Image (spheres, helix red, strand yellow):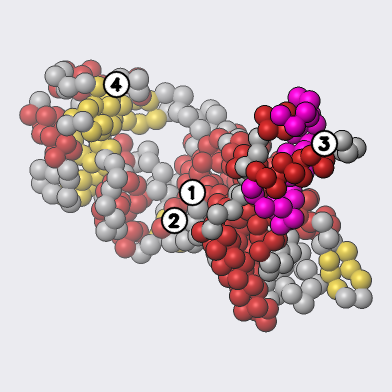
Amino acid sequence: MFLPDYVLKAVDILNKNGYKAYPVGGCVRNHLMGILPDDYDMTTNATPEEMLVAFKGYSSFDAGLKHGTLSVIIDSQVIEITTHRIESTYTDNRHPDGVIFTRQLELDLGRRDFTMNAIAYEPMTKAYHDPYMGIGDIRNSLIRSVGDAKARFEEDALRILRALRFSSVLGFSIEQKTSDAIHSCKHLLEKISPERIYTEFTKLICGSNAASVLREYSDVIEVFIPEIRPMIGFDQHNIHHCYDVYEHTLATLDAIEPEPLLRWTMLLHDIGKPETFFTDERGGHFYGHYKNSTDIAVRVLTRLRASNNTIDRVKTLIYHHDSVIPESTKSVRRLISKLGYDTLTDLFKVNRADAKGQAPHQLKERIEHIDRLENIAEELMQGVECFDIKHMMIKGNDLISLGIPKGKRIGKILAILFDELTEEKLTNTKEALMKRALELKDTDI
């Protein structure tokens, strides 16, 4: 196993002080999968006090020392080294009530979540310590709990989402007993903080296998996003749709790049459809579902403590995802002015993914329409255009010079001028804008 110099140096320091040291967990798993690790955690039979002595000449952080973890800086790199330990009961289904340090590596590996993460590597002998057959599970692309799966999830319920996240990101299947325990223990997620759920779930929905996981474990997702329940199996009764609402959602999620903002948008873009459904002689309709979906999306993301920026951007994309955009310079210019070019670019990505989740007979036509809108937007951005009120060739002081008093009226006139610019009723020259401002000066606005 390739190890960077700072890791080998940490191992050597502990070895020279009479202790064992092993890279462990995710870095070993990634190496066995052919993925270059981005960080390296280590476990050792040295106690916290013994580690402090061994690394006396190095800068370190001992904030986690009571749990056996010392963060050491070697060659400007931080490496976390933890004493072998076993853990007591988990009263809150998240954190151990206490830890007991041990000299035995196998006992430490036995407290870990999944077999693929319970492998240690000994650099001196180049030997893998794999008491729970994690290497075989990695080769078989299998996620299996260490020991009794139900006990592992009762200790730390976040492991439920970690299993789903690993399945989504790595493309591994989940061993049957582990899967059964996930379903039976799903209620324990109610005890996990919204922030931790949001972080783990965001990684999950960005995985290449996300749709499959969301399909098989929808009952687990319902624990913290119960709003998805009405979508599952909801027949749209519409010739433009070949899937129910949930399957359409999963298809669109698969069809967009794995960027958190876009994946959250696709997951929630039609979540308000069931509440707006009605039928007539032409089939099923969901008029105004974009408004309902926007409201629900804001509620979900707020509850999960997403950032205000994420909430605002997802809200904007969902609200506009069903808009009919005419293929004209005027309409695209108006959208760039309203949303900004970057947001409009994201909206086109959403539109394209949405189309790919609908009936195939209309896909070619819809994609070509989006392509043409994108071309118009690109041409506009390459030209000299005014897409923001602050880019107008007239300012508030110019209006004051015309005798228009300071106050709200200045803002109203500037807004009218900007609207008329985007409507192509005016050109962005000071002469044209001042002339129009004079016409508006004494009008009732």
Q: What distance separates the C-alpha of mark 2 from that of mark 3?
A: 61 Å
Q: Nearer the viewer, mark 1 or mark 3?
A: 3
The residue labelled by disc 1 is: 203
Q: Is residue 31 above or below residue 378?
A: above
Q: Name the residue nearer the viewer: 182 or 164.
A: 164
Inspect the image, locate mark 4, and give the three-letter code of the amino acid beneath it: Phe
11 lies left or right of 247: left
Secondary structure of the residue carrying numbered label 4: strand
Secondary structure of the residue carrying numbered label 3: helix
Inspect the image, locate mark 2, and give the three-letter code of the amino acid beneath it: Val
Name which residue lies at 78% across and 50% down: 292
17 lies left or right of 88: left
Q: What distance separates the C-alpha of mark 2 from that of mark 4?
A: 31 Å
Q: Quadrant of the C terminus?
A: top right
Which numbered tag is attached to residue 169?
A: 2
**Residue 109 location, quadrant:** top left
Inspect the image, locate mark 1, and give the three-letter code of the amino acid beneath it: Lys
Which numbered tag is attached to residue 441?
A: 3
Which numbered tag is attached to residue 61?
A: 4
Q: What distance separates the C-alpha of mark 2 from that of mark 1?
A: 8 Å
Does the stretch in magenta take in 403? yes
Looking at the image, is mark 4 or mark 1 earlier in the sequence?
Answer: 4
Q: Name the residue nearer the viewer: 305 or 93.
A: 305
State the image coordinates of residue 355 (x, y, percent, origin top left).
64, 69
Name which residue lies at 70% across and 61% down: 331
